[in-house]
Every structure is written in structure tokens, then in C-alpha cells.
Image (cartoon, coloured by chain):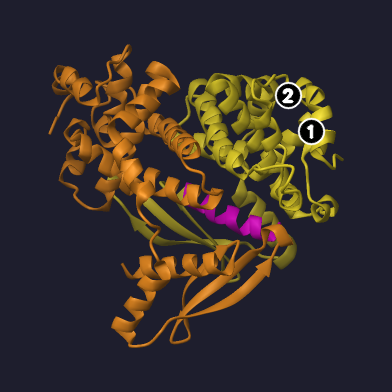
Chain colours: A yellow, B orange
Amino acid sequence: MLKSISDLVERLDALEAVLDYKFEDRNLLLEACSHCSFSNENRSDLENNNERLEFLGDAVLGMIVSHFLHQNMTDREGRLSSLKSSLVDAKACREYVLHLGIDDYLLLGKGERQNEGRGRETLLADFFEAIIGAIFLDGGFVSAEKFFLQHFIDTVLDRIKEPPRNWKAELQDLTQKHYRCQPSYELIKETGPDHSKLFVIGAYIQEKLVGTGTGNSKKQAEQEAAKCAVILYE
Amino acid sequence: MLKSISDLVERLDALEAVLDYKFEDRNLLLEACSHCSFSNENRSDLENNNERLEFLGDAVLGMIVSHFLHQNMTDREGRLSSLKSSLVDAKACREYVLHLGIDDYLLLGKGERQNEGRGRETLLADFFEAIIGAIFLDGGFVSAEKFFLQHFIDTVLDRIKEPPRNWKAELQDLTQKHYRCQPSYELIKETGPDHSKLFVIGAYIQEKLVGTGTGNSKKQAEQEAAKCAVILYE
């Protein structure tokens, strides 16, 4: 793991080779690699940490993924949104970093280097967004899009092919296993005009509310309610 | 208000003049103008409604605003995120449509034409996102960015200049007025490593919890908790 700016500067060629992107302005890449825990400890070496690039990269990644899904799928907005979430959330971004094998390039403060828990997932996810943000600033949207798709188009295509998780079936299995009974669903509220009804449904185990969900159909709202409950159990 | 595709087709020149953008592919503009309540009633006239363009445009608008704030402000990520939200949320998008004066170009189904409530805000907001999505597909990111900034740079600059709302002061005024007492704040949870502590704070009126908020400082978490409470009262 790198411990100083000079370690990183020596290895920038290697990092650019892995990314398969050559920066015009390498300061952007240095900034993307600097977690705030590092820049707080080493103020004299570095002016910026990667949080502003992460803010920007979050939007860039969202747009790359939205554009790809819009152009390559004919599904309605609901399915596109749910796929998009799964391709841009912290878990996905952490996996992109591990897939590229660039986690060692992130400069961390002393305390953070030992951290292996949830905080580490967030920090790797932020690192990926910062890298995307840096490529966008350096080479424009087309470069950022090219970078992402070149490395991750297979991940995206695999995700598109996966059938959506059946949360109701998963909740049923969980409930059967732990409580030896079935979950039930109740309509809590129904609102909106005919062409865009909104249903709010609750999922219950032994009459206790364990999740709520909304959707344009009762089926969809039940799935969302079951999803909440399953995620809470996971 | 327009009632048919042919009404709209006749007025596309006028709409493009208001947008100050000329489409290569006018089918994209027609799609952006078609709410699902209209396309459901007129299936033979029109294949698509604007919900997929709205999905795309949401990401495009997010990126335009993120890019502008990143390039024109030196603030930290928290302030950028909160400004961004206020510039891309449904209320903001509805105001963009009304500012351009293009609300009459949205093709609605019969029921929707009478709707004046909250549903109308959403539907105008979706319309704006669909227009941005259509311009992006037609002319690329730079065209979409140029369109947005050309019409709304003053709105963005004004928003940047506004001091952030002081939610704690607002909650104090409300509480004084309605309950003749002061709100109180309590730390509910404190988590995370030193460089990125996360605080969860509750706002209470007469010992009743009225809002919760999270933040990297207690001050920020209190503001967020007060904000929840104030919005609930509004």
C-alpha cells in the first residue's frame, strides 16, 4: 500500500496503464487518489482530497449508466431505474475498484489503512467515482464513457441479463425458516390518477410490520415491501 | 392547451424557438412532449411516452449541475450536494418549465388536463427532464449543457449566492409561535472513524421526536434534524 505522494507519483505510469487512460493533467489523478484521511495528515504535500471529484464522478457515472441502459434496452423506466441503482451503488463501485485491482493506489491516513469494515467499502466506492470524475474533467464525457464501458461492459450486460430478484419469494423462505409461518401483505394507501396509481403496501410477519413499499401496481409495491424486509434481515 | 399530435406538430417551430434549440430528429421532441396519460389514450398516434427520456434527462441534468457547481465553487462536497438537490428537484424542474412558458406543449390525457395539484408538479418536472434528455440524445452533452445554462445560469448563480437556510432558527421560531417553548436536540448515535464521524441527532418539541438528521458534525446533524421538522410543518 502506498504511503506518500512520492510513492504514488513514481507509480502513475502503472496506474494509467491499468486504467488504459493517459491524463493530460496528472494533478487530477493525484487528487482522485487522495482520501481525506491522508490529506488531513499531510497538508503540506497536497491541497485537495478526492471528495469534490467524487461529487462530480457520481453524476458522471450516473449519466454513463443511464445513457447505456436507455440506448440498449426497451424496458420501461422502473426497470431501468432499478438496474441503474445496482450498477452505481457503493457495492458496485467498490467491485469496479477491486476488478481493476487499483485499491492499493488510494492514499489513506494511518488509521484508515487498518480499516476493513463498511467504511472501507465506502472509501473504495468514493475512489472509483473520483477516478471517473477526474477522467471526465481531463478528457470530457466521451472519454469517461469509453473508460467505463471498456472495462465494465460485461458486468453491465450480465446485470441486464439477470432476472430481477424475487423479493417476495425470498421473504417467504426467510419467514418459513425463522418463524415457521407465511408473511402477509396489506394495502395501506392507494392514491393518484388512473394512469399512474400509486400503491403503498406493508409486509407483515405475525401481524408485525416488517417493511413498506410503493409502486404503480400492487405487485410492484409488494415486491418493494418484501425487499425492505429481506434487506433488514440480511 | 394542445390536444393532439397534429396540434403539436404545427407548433414545433414555435417550441424550438422558445428552447432556442433546433432538433435534428424531431421525433425526440415529440416523445418528450407526450405524457403517458396522453399516449395511453392515443396509442395509434404515438408509440412512446416521455418516461424513458425523463429517466435519461434526470441523469443529464444532474451532471450539468454537478459540473457547473464543481467548476464554479470551491466549497466542500456537502454544500455542493445540497445546492445540487435544490437545483434538480421536482420543484426546481417545474419552475424551469414555467419560466420557459412551455407547459402548454405537454400533451396530456383528458383527466390530467384538469389536474392542478401535486401530480401536476411532478408531471411538469418530468417534462423538463424529458426535454433535457431529448436534447442530449439529439445533440450530445455539450448541447444539453448549453441549453440549460443559456436559460438558467442566472437561477443557478442566484441560488449559489443565497445563504443556506438556517433550519434551527426556523424551527425555533415555529416552536415558539405554536408551543411557546424551545426545541431541544439530542445525540442519538455517533459512529465512524475520526476523519469522517457520522452523528445522528434528534430534534424534540416538548420531549416528542419531531425530526432526525445525520451529518459529519453535530451542528450539521442538528440542521438536518431541524430541516425535517420544519418541512413537516410547512
Find residue B8 and report its horizontal and vertical position in percent. Answer: 17, 23
Q: Is there any visible trace of residue A74 in the rendered image? A: yes
Find residue A28 and report its horizontal and vertical position in percent. Answer: 65, 31
Please tell me in which quadrant of the rendered image residue B111 appears.
Answer: top left
B200 over A161 or under it: above or below: below
Instruction: Tell me the amino acid under the disc marked 2.
Output: Leu
Tell me the CA gap for discs 1 and 2: 9 Å
Is A130 on the left-hand or right-hand side of B74? Answer: right
C-beta proximity under 8 Å, tags 1 and 2? yes
* Residue at x 44% of width, y 45% of height: B84
Q: Secondary structure at mark 2?
A: helix
Farthest front residue? Answer: A44
Question: Which residues are drawn in magenta?
Answer: A220-234
- Taking the magenta stretch, the answer to whether it contains residue A179 is no
- State the residue position of label 1: A102
Is B147 on the left-hand or right-hand side of A102? Answer: left
Find residue A82 and report its horizontal and vertical position in percent. Answer: 54, 40
- Taking the magenta stretch, the answer to whether it contains residue A225 is yes
Farthest top residue? Answer: B24
Is B145 on the left-hand or right-hand side of B188? Answer: left
Q: Secondary structure at mark 1?
A: loop
* Label 1 CA crowd tier, 10 Å (few <14, some 14–19, many 20+): some
Find residue B87 and report its horizontal and vertical position in percent. Answer: 38, 44
In-front residue for pair A9/B178 = A9
* Residue at x 27% of width, y 39% of height: B96
* Residue at x 69% of width, y 60% of height: A233
The chain letter for the residue carrying disc 2 is A
Instruction: Tell me the amino acid under the disc marked 1.
Output: Ile
State whether discs 1 and 2 lie on one chain: yes
The chain letter for the residue carrying disc 1 is A
Disc marking residue A19 = 2
**Sequence-earlier tag: 1 or 2:** 2
